[in-house]
Amino acid sequence: MSSRAKILRDGGGWDSPAAKALARTWGDKPGLIGWISTVDHKAIGRRFIVTAFGFFALAGMMGGLMRHQLSVPSNTIVGPDFYNQLFTMHGTTMMFLFAVPVMQGIAVYLVPLMIGTRNTAFPRMTACSYWIYLIGGLTLFAGFAFGTGADAGWFAYVPLAGPEYGIGKRADFWNVLVNFTEAMGLMVAVDIATVILKMRAPGMSLRRMPLFVWASLVMAFMIIFSMPTVMLGANLVQLDRMLGTHFFNPAEGGDVLLWQHMFWFFGHPEVYFIFIPALGFVSAIIPTFARRPMFGHDAIVLSLIATGFLSFGLWVHHMFATNIPELGKSFFTAMSFMIAIPTAVQIFCWIATLATGRLNFRTPLLFVLGFFFVLLIGGLTGIILGSVPLDLQVTDTYFVVAHLHYVLVGGAVFPLLGAFFYWFPKVTGHMMSERMGQWQFWLFFIGVNVTFFPMHQLGLDGMPRRVYTYLAESGWGTLNLVSIIGAVVVDMSMLLFVLNVVLSLFRRERAAENPWGAPTLEWAVPSPPPPFNFVVLPVVSSREPLWSRETGGATHVSGLATGTREGLVTTVLDAVPDVRYIYPSPGIWPFVAALAVAGWLIWSIFSVRGALWGMIPPTIAFIAWFWPRKRENDQHLALEKRP
Amino acid sequence: MNAVLDPAGPQAAHIAELWWVTLAVCALVFVAVLAVLAWGLWRAPRGDPQMVPGARPAPGAEKHLIRWVTAATVISTILLSGLLVASVATDRELAQLSLTNALNVRVKAHQWWWEVTYDDPQPERMFATANELRIPVGRPVLVTLDSGDVIHSFWVPRLHGKKDLIPGRTATIQLRADKAGEYHGPCAEYCGLQHAFMAFEVIALPPEQFETWAEAQRKPAADPEDAAARRGRELFLSGSCMLCHAIHGTTANARTAPDLTHIASRTRLGAGRLANTPQDLAAWIADPQKFKPGVNMPAHLLPDDDLKALVAYLGMLK
Amino acid sequence: MKITGAIGLAAAIVVVAGCEREQREFDKPSISSNPRAQAAGMSALQPGAPGRGMQPTASAGGYNEKSAYEIAQGKQLYRWYNCVGCHAQGGGGIGPALMDDQWIYGSTPDAIFATIVEGRPNGMPSFRGRIPEAQVWQLVAYVRSMGGLVSSDVAPNRSDGLLGAPPEGLREPKRPAENKPK
């Protein structure tokens, strides 16, 4: 396009020429190449979510198999070796391959829509990270399928995962998986943080930003500060295993506990950056279903930030049974108790909002109510575990298994399912069945409680974790049998969920733009949204843009080009328009770079030389990716001239 | 059953006290929060998506809500501070167990058994056993913890909380049993294939019975009296057993497997896996892998009378 | 989802070799742990090549140098059965070095098995009846790994102790030049 041609600007309705031009510019090429090379945040977000739920199903089946094995004493369904791989794979998959990616994927999908922009800031990086995630997860599972499943626990303590006792390549697969997933996490976190801070719609100052976007921002920063630690630690273990270094060898000056510190410094914030986006879901669902703005919006923002910050000071509570000095441990007790306070503030604000609203008891709200019940129990058992003497009795027992499932299932999966029901119409254009949703909720709620509540008592009865079976004289048989009944109920609810999704996708009626009457910007676009999100970027003048606006003043931004992928960069605090930005176009290089990085990491599992020479293909791929393109530069220059 | 809440010594008793206090506070908070939530849900009118949403309240219009939320937060903070004080206080109580006249025991954890050595100022009075810790009632015990391979964890729920045994780090744990009895202790840190079957028993005896037992343990192995036991000892010393196991008083002095000098005096075999009966011992020797797949002891295909002789010999090592 | 399938297949192919490496067999009843179970007619000390037909051979099964677990067990047994007492961590002392290229009686699994089970002149004791056959094969695999003769992805890594020798997986293969009794 010559620089002299008339540049069609955005503006008009969803059927206007501008909209059609935008659709052409922002659409993907058809076919496989188009699918691989997309930079549409919605496509990438959907991929993350679908893949994450796939891993969730796999890990859930492993959990079910574990429950079966433990349902009666001296059971022989699986032997110790396979059981050790099962619980390691279950934990690793749930934490690394499901919980974090699904939260990041939802953020990638929703955040640009919620803040009124066309795409995330670095969509090619996010596209690349998806492929890295997928290949990493598949590599771990391929290892599992062929007997090389990681078997040292999802936390892979040395020396059990170290060079002498971590026999074979199992622990190597785990360490390399950490590289895959943390690389993905960091890439997505940087993208989300940038788009939130720099690309919000004009007028959406930080004080007007939706709570889910705040949660995503806090999550992104937590990821950036915590993931490098575990990557470093895993790579140090790899050096010990492959090269014979002594980082974790006490006989030669290393320290076994170093790994625990490095892992848990990441591991504790990790559970919070799974939890905080879920809190964002709750904060998005409650105002919609209470038909009123959130009470204590500012308090909730500050609580989210405080939670994120404090979560970095808790990690030693996973190490209370070691011989670290007692006074030091008490500091971490204090911090563990302290973090309950911002969470409590949020809960109280939510209750206040619900109590003074007008309630619409649909499935998303039901899941939020289930979240209250289950998370409250989990949080309170967390207080019990935060105290050093109590922790010394119940840590590493089924009490902790109960606690962690209550906080993760209650604190993350309940809101996630509610969010799924809530945003499904927006993503797919179809409503989910309300009746099946209610059935699913009640089955899930009952099943989760029946499965995991008895485990508190099992821990008090002395049943340790990570045991593949137990003797009848221990007396643990009855409660384990109760637990499997709950697990079956949970399975039923999950089947119902899958059925609901599949049937809903094939409904004839299309969902409206805003079926729930919600306040945030993503509900101002058609369901599903077009590739360019908004025909004109909105100007925001309140916290609930679709519910209220100040009269007078601009309502939208006009003047962005439709022939290139042009967007607006605004200032950090008050979202005043700053510069125009050309979003990256689709391309194949993110995919190729991901393949090269994956090849390098997989090769490094088997060979030290691989770790070194394997760096060459990714280097080439990244150089090719970033090489400036003359045609693009010319186009951008043309747009920089005054219209 | 209910090991943690059935303390048999002061350490576990302190922890159980803290448990009840904390549980009471947490249960109170749980009921209160859910009650308020339920009340709020019940009294709020119903709405639907078409209903015009409430306008943003004017600043200062929701003062009563602010007051409630602030009050609830302040109450939560006070409760948490109280729990913190209780927790630190319990920690101090645990550290202040008097160690006068303490019994000194060293426990070294291996995959998947416990090596127990009773220390004594006079070296000839030291003795070793395995997978069993007998202690006198009412006397404090100072256990020094070490690991020979990976991380394990020492835990006797009815007596105290856990302490990890970490290679390269020597930890200690102080406990006391105030009631006679047998207290089960599973390994409480994942340590590989047979973490599930790595338990030890703590047996608290009245002091005189403990001294009798300790004296017996200090003696070397008894000499076999009948032909079967003699043949059993011959098999032990000429076969593969002596490569790993020690029986003091014979030429068997290896330390890579449990000390068998007084094996017949123990209540269980295989780190708690089997009861110490002749049939179970015979089955264990013939194929330990059947009971603990992956354990370091290999199978032994012995002819029946040889196995009987070996069991007869081991059975007289009280 | 063709790409997903293709990637999955590639990853699967890459790790197919893993299945043998990661096998762990626990149930191995052994015969020669009983000194009385020797077949009649076996002579006691036979230095040199193993007697034909009287000794279990590697090809009869029982020997597996493709399993990382077997070699790791062999490494543990090397320490527990006090091979270090004469051979140190491979550098030798009272006994010859095991990590160099001088294989006095040969580096084949059968030869090493015979060395351990029958003993050799000049001080290598016979462990027949002491060490079960399955464990002898584990030791054989480990001894071969000390000379770098097993694949590097199944060889053990460094041990968690004082560094006595480079990790077995990083050693150059030490094939015997010729069989030369010392």
Image (cartoon, helix red, strand yellow):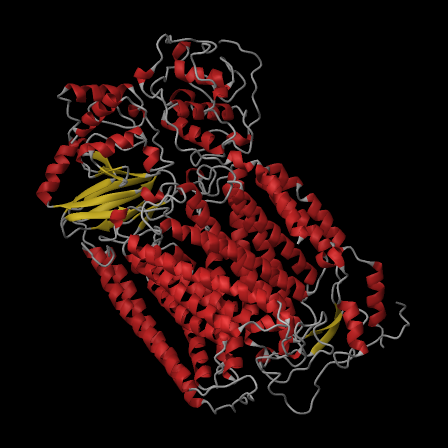
Left or right of residue C59: residue B88 = left
Left or right of residue A622: residue A632 = right
Judged from this view, the residue extending furthest toward the front is: A508
Left or right of residue A545: residue B186 = left
Report x, y in % for residue A367.
47, 72
Report x, y in % for residue A173.
54, 44
Judged from this view, the residue extending furthest toward the left is: B208
Q: Quadrant of residue B295?
A: top left
User: Quick check: A241 above or below B34?
Assistant: above
Is any atom of residue A313 visible in this view?
Answer: no
Total of numbered circles in the picture? Answer: 0
Q: Quick one: B287 or B209, which is closer to the camera?
A: B287
In the rendered image, the quadrant that contains the N terminus of chain A is bottom right
**Residue drawn where x is 34% and y is 14% of the image:** C38
Left or right of residue C21: residue A622 = right
Is any atom of residue A502 visible in this view?
Answer: yes
Report x, y in % for residue B165.
34, 45
User: Quick check: C78 above or below A380?
Assistant: above
**Residue drawn where x is 63% and y is 37% of the image:** A609
Q: Quick one: A322 or A448, which is closer to the camera?
A: A448
Report x, y in % for residue C75.
43, 29
In the rendered image, the quadrant that contains the C terminus of chain A is bottom right
**Residue drawn where x is 73% and y is 47% of the image:** A620
